[in-house]
């Protein structure tokens, strides 16, 4: 893509801030929108313009032309923890998305990306569960492919699928290539909880536990998950949007699959005093998500855990 200006919604949180930092590192100018920002206001440099706004009230005026819009804004905290109904929870997420899609139809950027999630799937949606039989991709183990129909009925999954449908039916006069991108398990530097995202990744939890002298808990069934280093998202997206619209939701994730115990032991080895303990498994965990076969990413170098953990352990993590 020749254009070098991107609008990122939800840019104040973990994923959005990773995208903002990633695109600025690529030389893009970033318009970052959120209701609040986790990072220090001075971060981001001169290439980042921060806009504090509630997208439920519409996209603010005066943003200027952009070449790419990445909609990362989403409330992941469960409705019962927020004290709202399922319908209200859906509205919290879909109303901002609708506002952004209306803005996109007017502004006509070259590309729009909606960040969905593997959370649309239920644990039974793949041919295999999350046990150690779900090995690395080179073992050709079954997993969550983009050909599977997701069935989870959680409020989060229902709202995300509704968002995917909204994007699929959005009218942009053919000017804007539309992409629905499902992300899987993410980890990276600067991860912390916020009201709209109370949970943090297992990696962040393990690092925090090791630093505080607490044991690193691993389920007895040792689930295997695909882990994506959050700073990889921006360069991978920049490659993807150079091409045409992607047909249907795509699985946008690293091919690196690790067992929980393997990663927890790596964290424990990196932080003095870290100790891994086994805890009972409660419920099933989804199988690893299988990346979609995208020509633009066939030679993309996704960061392996050894390098990602080296950087993550060197940064403060608040769980």
Image: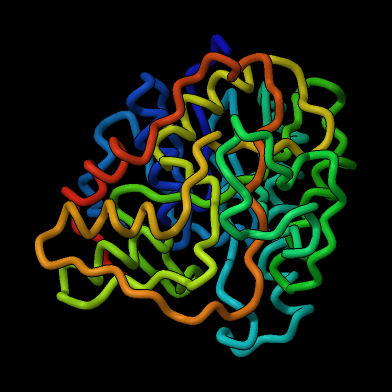
Relative vertical location of residue 126 with respect to residue 276 in this rendering, above or below: above
Relative vertical location of residue 48 with respect to residue 299 in this rendering, above or below: below
Looking at this view, name the residue that lies furthest to the left: 272
Residue 237 percent location from the top left of the image: 56, 28
Residue 230 percent location from the top left of the image: 42, 42
**Quarter occupied by the C terminus:** bottom left
Foreground pick, 276 / 226: 276
Among the 4 quarters of the image, the one containing residue 275? bottom left
Foreground pick, 23 / 184: 184
Residue 8 percent location from the top left of the image: 52, 41
Residue pictured at 44% horizontal, 58% vertical: 260
Residue 123 percent location from the top left of the image: 72, 64
Residue pictured at 66% horizontal, 86% vertical: 84
Residue pictured at 27% horizontal, 31% vertical: 46
**Quarter occupied by the N terminus:** top right
Look at the image and name its color scheme: rainbow
Side (left or right) of 243 relative to 317:
right
Side (left or right) of 201 relative to 119:
left
Among the 4 quarters of the image, the one containing residue 75? bottom right
Side (left or right) of 141 relative to 223:
right
Among the 4 quarters of the image, the one containing residue 25? top left
Relative vertical location of residue 285 with respect to residue 12 in this rendering, above or below: below
Residue pictured at 47% horizontal, 72% vertical: 219
């Amino acid at each position: 893509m020749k254009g070098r200006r991107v609008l990122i919604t939800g840019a104040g949180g973990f994923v959005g801030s990773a995208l903002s930092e990633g695109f600025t590192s690529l030389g893009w100018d970033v318009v970052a929108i959120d209701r609040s920002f986790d990072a220090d206001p001075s971060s981001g440099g001169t290439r980042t313009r921060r806009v504090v706004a509630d997208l439920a009230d519409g996209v603010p005026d005066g943003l200027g032309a952009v070449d790419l819009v990445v909609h990362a804004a989403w409330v992941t905290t469960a409705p019962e923890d927020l004290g709202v109904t399922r319908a209200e929870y859906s509205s919290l997420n879909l109303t901002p998305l609708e506002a952004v899609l209306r803005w996109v139809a007017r502004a006509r950027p070259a590309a729009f990306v909606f960040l969905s999630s593997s959370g649309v799937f239920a644990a039974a949606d793949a041919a295999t569960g999350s046990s150690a039989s779900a090995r690395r991709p080179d073992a050709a183990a079954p997993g969550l492919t983009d050909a599977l129909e997701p069935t989870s009925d959680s409020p989060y999954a229902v709202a995300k699928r509704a968002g995917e449908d909204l994007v699929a039916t959005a009218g942009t006069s053919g000017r804007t290539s539309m992409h629905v991108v499902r992300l899987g398990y993410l980890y990276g530097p600067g991860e912390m909880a916020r009201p709209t995202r109370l949970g943090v990744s297992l990696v962040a939890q393990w690092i925090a536990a090791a630093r505080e002298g607490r044991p690193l808990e691993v389920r007895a069934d040792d689930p295997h998950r695909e882990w994506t280093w959050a700073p990889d998202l921006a360069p991978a997206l920049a490659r993807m949007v150079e091409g045409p619209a992607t047909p249907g939701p795509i699985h946008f994730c690293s091919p690196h699959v690790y067992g929980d115990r393997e990663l927890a032991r790596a964290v424990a080895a990196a932080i003095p005093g870290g100790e891994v303990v086994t805890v009972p498994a409660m419920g099933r965990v989804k199988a690893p998500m299988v990346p979609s076969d995208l020509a633009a990413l066939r030679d993309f170098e996704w960061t392996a855990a050894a390098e990602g953990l080296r950087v993550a352990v060197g940064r403060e993590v608040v769980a």
